[in-house]
Image (tube, rainbow, N blue to C red):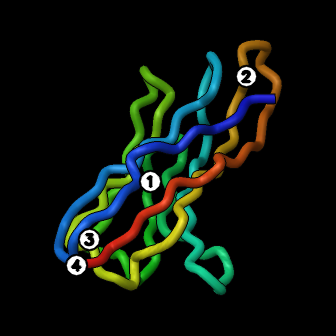
Amino acid sequence: QVRLVESGGGLVQPGGSLRLSCAASETIRRFYTVVWYSQAPGKERELVATITSTGSTDYADSVKGRFTISRDDDNFSVYLQMNSLQPDDTAVYYCHGQGRDVDYLLFDSWGQGTQVTVSS
């Protein structure tokens, strides 16, 4: 089963930026829709941003104008550029994606999450 691997999290000051990456753990044929979620301590997991196989995007109201989701199909990766970060953005960020593995079998996978902490 294909796994997704997130990276790019860390500690950043308010107003700072981070770029998260989501990549497949092994060679795949393609990604379909990929979604970034966030989960703050004591809260439910929330949708942050979505990108479809055709590149259409959608965002939670709380991140519109600050976050940008993008994809690199040549490298089977999806990114989340996060600007103007605020303490309320502190959370573990997860990616979830569907696609076709090397045998063209459909996969539906989550990553393990990457911690984003916004604090001065």
Tell me which numbered mark, 2 or 1, is placed earlier along the sequence. Answer: 1
In what element is the residue under mark 4? loop
| Amino acid bearing label 4 | Ser
Q: CB of mark 1 within 8 Å of CB of mark 4?
A: no
Query: Cα distance, mark 2 to mark 1?
Result: 22 Å
Q: Is residue 83 left or right of residue 91?
A: left
Displayed quadrant of residue 69: bottom left
Q: Which residue is mark 4?
A: 120
Query: Cα distance, mark 2 to mark 4?
Result: 42 Å
**Where the C terminus falls, by quadrant?**
bottom left
Q: CB of mark 3 within 8 Å of CB of mark 4?
A: no
Q: Is residue 36 left or right of residue 88?
A: right
| Amino acid bearing label 2 | Asp
Q: Position of residue 108 (x, y in %)?
A: 77, 43
Q: Which residue is mark 2?
A: 101
Query: How would you rate the neighbour count of disc 3 (Cα within 10 Å): few for under 14, some for 14-19, many for 20 or more?
Result: few
As drawn, the label of residue 56 is 1
Tell me which numbered mark, 1 or 3, is placed earlier along the sequence. Answer: 1
Tell me which numbered mark, 1 or 4, is placed earlier along the sequence. Answer: 1
Disc number lying in front (3 or 4): 4
As drawn, the label of residue 66 is 3
Q: Residue at x 34, y 82 (%)?
A: 87
Which residue is at the front of the view, 46 or 72?
46
Relative to 117, residue 61 above or below: below
| Amino acid bearing label 3 | Arg
In what element is the residue under mark 3? loop
